[in-house]
Image: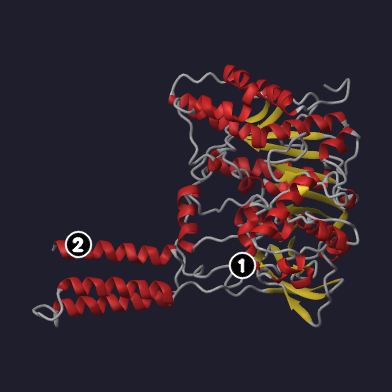
Amino acid sequence: MARKIIGAVLLLLMLAVLELNKNTIAGWVVFILLTAGFAALRETVLRDSKLLPRAGLWVGWFAAFAAVLFLTYPPVQSVPATDVSSPRKTGVITVAQGSLTGVYNSDGTVEVYAGIPYAQPPVGELRWREPRDPLPWEGIREADTFAPMSMQPTNTPIYSSLAQIIGYHDYSISLSDNYLPPVSEDSLYLNVWKPAGDVSGAPVLVYIHGGSLQTGQPWYGDYSGEGLAREGVIVVNMGYRLGVFGYFADEELAAESPNGTTGNYGLLDQIKALEWVRDNIAAFGGDPGNVTLSGESAGAASVSALCTSPLAAGLFRRVILESSTVAGTEPPHSFRLLDEALKSGGELKARHGCATVAELRALSAEELVSEAYTQHHITVDGYALTETPYESYMKGIHNEEAILHGCNAEESGPFIIFDHASMKDYEQKVRGYFKEYADDVLAIYPASDDSEADGYWAEIYGSVFFNYPHYCLDRLAVQNGIPAYEYLFTKHNGRLGSWHSGEMIYCFGNIPESSGLFDAGDRALSRTMVSCWLNYIGTGDPNGEGRPEWEQSTTSGRLLEFGENVGMTDEKRLALYGVLDRMTGFGLSEGNE
């Protein structure tokens, strides 16, 4: 009996591995049949056999499982534009490069057009060059699957599944996801969600995904354009070059560029996508003169840079930045000056034994992709960015006419999973970062036990990397007379809560009806946030009838809380921000302090 129980437990564990690893259905069938065969052998032929001990049978079973796991590894397959098994096609839409059809969502309220090229594939000799106009195509293009995600480091399926369970507390067993999405350098494609039917003059939201400029893809469900498209907005997002392919800088590359640029290829991709929207979005019913540019995390850092890029002038009217900006004097992530970028690029060439860019271009993408961790920073290249955003704002230079932006209460959550603090190391952590300013910070956050130390470190970390940069942006906006509306997301739920990126599923209106991780309060908050976002996208003001009163920033000491309570609240981290001002040298023009 004990052996049968052990065998049953092991069988369940093996089947769980097959599911978490996304092995094909054939793998399940073969392994179950093999298991049945081994069980029959154990009970019949081998019951009294002296030739093969029972241990050998166990070894054979495990070997069969390993073989099935390997031989039925999930195949690479394009991600469908909708979750409908046989979606209905849309009518034909014609853009500058040709004609295309999309597909309808499950209830027919939204049309999705996926995988539309906005630039030529940046491969071969086009690697590390400015994006070029897309080529025309013949016939009618079926835009019913998403293009490959941009080249990036990837994890095994089982790792990704466990991360979904542990990090998001959200996992669904399905027979329709037994595949791997493609990854490629050929990823400069965009996707459009529009309200079904005839649309004219609709406001447009262009969204840039996050992922530290190293990872990410446009089809993630939290920021799918479907939720907002149901409400009358046309949503566009895109793939753009990441990591070493998007942000590697080299003097040889600058010399061969007609614009003298290097290090900002991912940013130039985003600008190219915005130009495509300007030229083509009217074909989908969108108003090219009413574009809001939005992003989260590294996507928001990109939006922040585009706010002061001379190349992006006139391509959007207003912006939404969620959980990142590079507007401070010393952006804490996703940004570096050109000298640093060139030095890092030279070190990369040396690591790969390459003396020239031609030799680097001859390497495969797989040989270079691990350099994502060293090359993922926007830079001041003299072309896309002529100076830091802070310097531009101090001169009154900016492209946006309104800003909606903010952060989450527990931004640090996913970043300190393995870096929690206790009384043993709390002071050391603070002194390691703040150095001569550490005493000031410790006076603001005087931890007396492990719980306080851990909580304070989480707040400090999140403030430095996310919340404080938004405080900087808000003050620069006020100085420049830009209407700015700042928020703080504080809602807890069964999923991410107010961790980094936890707000996206709310403001995009994508909480699944069937999800038990969100309650009625979450759904009501999502409706409120969507309503504010819709009014802002349409008019530049999130206020209106039935919406919470959202005060325009004047002193940057107040913001709107989205949580159990929805309403204006005081900024509670001003003491820490004062230390960071002194530490980074942030200042405003006289009379605007």
Number of residue marks: 2
Q: Residue at x 14, y 77 (%)?
A: 43
Residue at left 73%, top 43%?
A: 321
| Looking at the image, residue 389 lies above or below residue 205 | above
Instruction: Indicate whether 402 appears above or below 295.
Output: above
Relative side of 276 to 159, left or right:
right
Seen in the picture, residue 321 relative to 52 is either above or below; the reply is: above
Label 1 Cα neighbours within 10 Å, binned few <14 / some 14-19 / many ≥20:
few
The quadrant where residue 251 appears: bottom right
For the N terminus, the quadrant is bottom left
Identify the disc placed on residue 584.
none
- Give coordinates of residue 492: x percent, y percent: 53, 37
Nearer to the camera, 289 or 262 = 262
Taking the image as drawn, is residue 294 in sight? no
Side of 343 where 13 appears, left or right: left
Q: CA distance from mark 1 to mark 2?
A: 44 Å
Dividing the picture into quadrants, the one containing residue 552 is top right
**Who is closer to the viewer here, 403 or 575?**
575
The three-letter amino acid code for the residue at tag 2 is Ile
Residue placed most toward the observer, 13 or 590 = 590
Location of residue 181 by image quarter: bottom right
Element under disc 1: helix
Residue at (85, 64) in percent of width and height:
280
Residue 366, numbered circle: 1
User: Which residue bears the numbered disc 2?
Assistant: 5
Which amino acid lies under the numbered mark 1 shown in the image of this protein? Glu
Q: Name the spot of residue 476 as percent of width and height, x first.
A: 82, 32
Q: Is residue 188 left or right of residue 170?
A: right
